[in-house]
Amino acid sequence: MKRYLSPLITISAIMMLCFFAMMVFPGFAAADDLPTTLHLDLSQPPQRETEDEDLALKKYNEVMEEIAISAEAKEVVEQIKNAVEGVADLTMDISVTEIRGQRIERMCFTLLASVESKVARVEFSEPSELRGYILVANQEKMESRMYQPINNQIAVRGLEDASKEVLSTLSIADLNTFFDFSQYKVEILEVVEEEGVCDYLLQVDGLEEMLQVRVKSNTWFPHEIAVFEEDALVGTMNIGEVVLNPGLCLEELTDLPKVKEVRM
Amino acid sequence: MGARSRIVITICMLGILALGPVSSAWAFDAEDLPFGFGPWGWQEGLQLSQENVRSLGLFGYEKTGIGGFLTHAEGDDQPSSWFGGHKQVYMGNVGYTLELFAGNTQRPVLSTFLTSSEPHFGAYGEFNRMYGDVGTGLAGTAQIFVTELGQFEYSISPYIQFSRQGLWRFSLSLGSFFGIGMSYSEPLEKVKLDITLVNEGLSFHVLFSITELPMTLGLGMTQEKVQAFMRYLF
């Protein structure tokens, strides 16, 4: 059902956009009817346009209501958003598992990030091929420094070569929006209450991928996120040991072994 | 970019972190003038190297290069030379090196110290892996001498290395010769040390890089023969 709903919503949205465009720019619909001379009366406010905009907004809200989430889901989404909003810095342990056919790849690391200094530090612990690697990404300097135990050196690279997608994903400045699901259709699949704490399982729908997010009501910080593609599990991200606003200083974030630096 | 897209990229595209962000190449070339003094008297020459570095994502890179030197000693009719081409790949905590070489001196210790030998060509290979601060590896050399006898030499050297206030490596040398060795590289690679004991002959080499000047100074002793080097990089 959801599979049919998503294209339907998209088509509705496209139709609404076309409708909105035709209302705002009527010339698009009938260019032949345009007068040869154009007179602009700027003395009066454009009443008709405001009415049109109101109508378009009304239609837009109607469409949005179709994909709107339940009051309970909306509250959970809001709580998650609020939990991350205004965070200056944080530390957490992250474990990412990706399923590639028959292979399951796992990566574990500790993330330390500061929104103010726009610096993220990633300390890798798994797989063993990456154990001991430390990455310090400085978004302000657009530079990454990677400590490499294999040759006991630090590789310094500019972030200019990184793709926009990666930069946007790793953007420390937008940390607050990482768990903002308010733009998506969210459904509560399961609620398990244990010792007064509710563990919610949310489903965040998208056109291609679907997320399942687990969040507890005592922290409102997602602790497990699973990605599904066409109902098949693609990967999971587990988050633990989350400390918000631990007061990280820049020196702590950028501290690397005093070894030879190689600028790439 | 929305929250959903960012999470999907984080989970589904570990490959982006591992392989995606950069894959451009950089070229390095270096020239230096080695001046030395040893059992053969004064020696001077020219050393050249050219290397391309290609990034393999965030966690790896590949170096491909050629290098060599030509030196002349005052007490020797023929110049000494050694040339080689190499490929070195690091991917996370795993690395390997392949090198093909030819020359009439042995593979220079710490890329500087020379020991004359018969003209030969050969290959060097190395595989190493780190597990945090500790690592293991295996290096091997095979060389054929361009002489009437066509002598063949080889060595296999398993080693263990530690990363504590620098890089320490302890190795065994098996094959045509038996030996043990130890090398150390200071964290900033300003001091490098190499000690080997092969067939009861002790070798000791140390190399200092001077921070303020583009210069390295070296002192070596091979079976009671001392040699000193100064390399000026330009």
Image (cartoon, coloured by chain):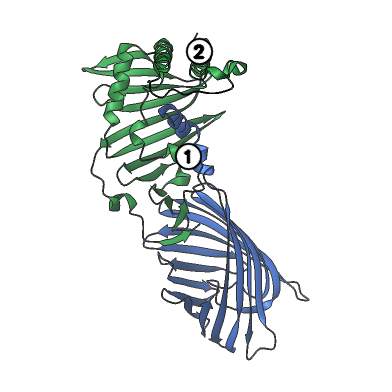
For this view, does B7 lie left or right of residue A84?
A: right
Residue in front for this viewpoint, B197 or A141: A141
Q: Where is residue A54 in the image (x, y as percent from the top left)?
A: 39, 14
- For label 1, the residue is A166
**The N terminus of chain B lies in quadrant:** top left
Question: Which residue of the protein is positioned furthest toward the left in this rendering?
Answer: A196
Can the viewer see residue B91?
Answer: no
Q: Position of residue B183 (x, y in %)?
A: 46, 67
x then y, percent, for residue B90: 54, 52
Above/below status of B10 relative to B191? above
| SS under mark 2 | helix
Question: Few, some or many C-alpha atoms within 10 Å of disc 2 (few <14, some 14-19, many ≥20)?
Answer: some
- Among numbered discs 1 and 2, the one appearing first in the sequence: 2
Q: In this view, does B172 lie above or below B10?
A: below
Chain A image colour: green
Counting from the top left corner in percent of width and height, residue B52 is at: 60, 59
Q: Which amino acid does label 1 sit on?
A: Val
Amino acid type at mark 2: Ser
| Colour of chain B in the image | blue
As displayed, is residue B146 above or below residue A63? below
Q: Which residue is drawn at 36% across and 62% down?
A: B165
User: Crowding at label 1, few (<14), some or many (≥20) Cα neighbours within 10 Å?
Assistant: some
Task: Read off the residue under disc 2.
Answer: A12
Q: Answer left or right for B53 relative to B101.
A: left
Question: What residue is rendered at 36% in x and 55% in y?
Answer: A256
B13 relative position to A79: left or right: right
The chain to which mark 2 is attached is A
The C terminus of chain B lies in quadrant? bottom right
